[in-house]
Image (spheres, helix red, strand yellow):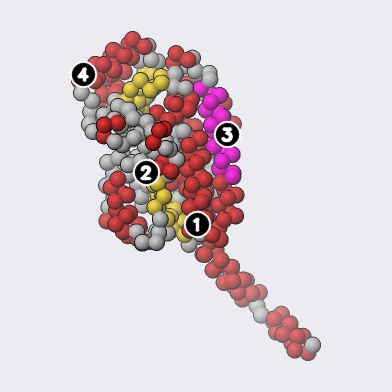
Amino acid sequence: MHSLRHDYRTLCRVPLTALLLLGMLLVLPIQLAAASLRVVTTVAPITSIVENVAGDRARVTGIVPEGVNSHTFRPVPSDARTMARADLIIMNGLYLEIPTLKLAEANKRPDKPILLLADRTLGEADYVFDFSYPQDQGHPNPHLWPDPVLVMNYARLVRDALTAADPGGRTAYHANTELYLKQLAALHEAIAAAVATVPPGNRRLLTYHDSWPYFAKRYGFTVIGAVQPSSFAEPSPREVARLIDQLKREKVPAVFGSEVFPSPVLAQIAREAETRFIDSLRDDDLPGETGDPVHSYTGMMLENIRTIVTALGGSADALKAVDHAPVAGHHARYR
């Protein structure tokens, strides 16, 4: 008993600042361990999906800078070092990021996995081949993420991969995913409600880059064409003339370009077809700046659907109820 009283009196004489410092030292290793998982991603929508599931338990680094054509992007030497340090590499897949995938396979540690989300979301029977992705070239359209229902499966795949890499984070990953799935479900329902206000005859899309076939299938749009061919060059004069004739014949209210793919040719097509040209769709470029609540996959889709629906004669009011902020309050780093 005397020994216990002596220890207590000694402890009471320890300065308060020292006790606080001791407490910080005891907690710090836990905090560092919680964020020690290194995850590498590619395009910004995939990065946003991963950060929503990972929260603060992982350091998420996006390799493909925003506003860059992900099809023609070539990784730099420093990306090889980033891949070599990664505990988990997550890509869209379906041949979207071929140079980056090759770099990852050559430099990652042998025991660290690469998760290709689209490859594990669609079966071959559900692949879409179109003008930009012809079947004779063997590469289906990889742009699954404009369909939030497919993104729900992305989120589940990310959850399971993160849990396998970091079993101690299972509770956090599952909780984040449940919140995120609710946000994605609300997004899906709001898109369906907004699209329902578009006159059926106006539910047709002509875009520069062919990013919307899975979205169109989900929400009852018809993709009447894409200006950019599979070679990522400009379309031929014959193709331009065909699109102009089609727009005039079908009286399409608007055609859509992209911030990532500026297209004087599409602007010319719109002028000659006497329809509106809107060049603000975001295929894989998130709105706002890193750290902004709107800088998220959901924020990007809300902005896109608002643009499409209003240009085609509908109302975007249903979108107002959807929260676009990351559910885990965490933002990834971009190189």
Give the side of residue 202 with respect to residue 173, left or right: left
**Could you say which disc has been placed on residue 164 in the image?**
1
Give the mark nearer the N terminus: 1 vs 2: 2
CB under 8 Å between discs 3 and 4 = no
Give the mark nearer the N terminus: 3 vs 1: 1
User: Can you say which quadrant of the picture contains the N terminus?
Assistant: bottom right
State how far apart marks 3 and 1 are (Cα).
28 Å
Q: Which residue lies furthest to the bottom in this view?
A: 2
Give the side of residue 72 with respect to residue 15, left or right: left
Find the magenta span and give its range. 178-195
> Given the image, on which type of amino acid does mark 4 rest?
Arg
Residue depicted at x 57% and y 56%: 170
> Taking 6 as reference, is 179 above or below it?
above
Local SS, label 2? loop
Judged by its main secondary structure, the magenta piece is helix
Query: Label 2: few (<14), some or many (≥20) within 10 Å?
Result: many
Give the mark nearer the N terminus: 3 vs 2: 2
* Residue under label 2: 93
Residue depicted at x 35% and y 34%: 141
Q: Where is residue 279 in the image (x, y as percent from the top left)?
A: 36, 27
Give the mark nearer the N terminus: 3 vs 4: 3
Give the mark nearer the N terminus: 4 vs 1: 1
Give the mark nearer the N terminus: 4 vs 2: 2
> Taking 102 as reference, is 66 above or below it?
above
Local SS, label 1? helix
How many numbered discs?
A: 4
What is the quadrant of residue 288 in the picture? top left
> Given the image, on which type of amino acid does mark 3 rest?
Ala
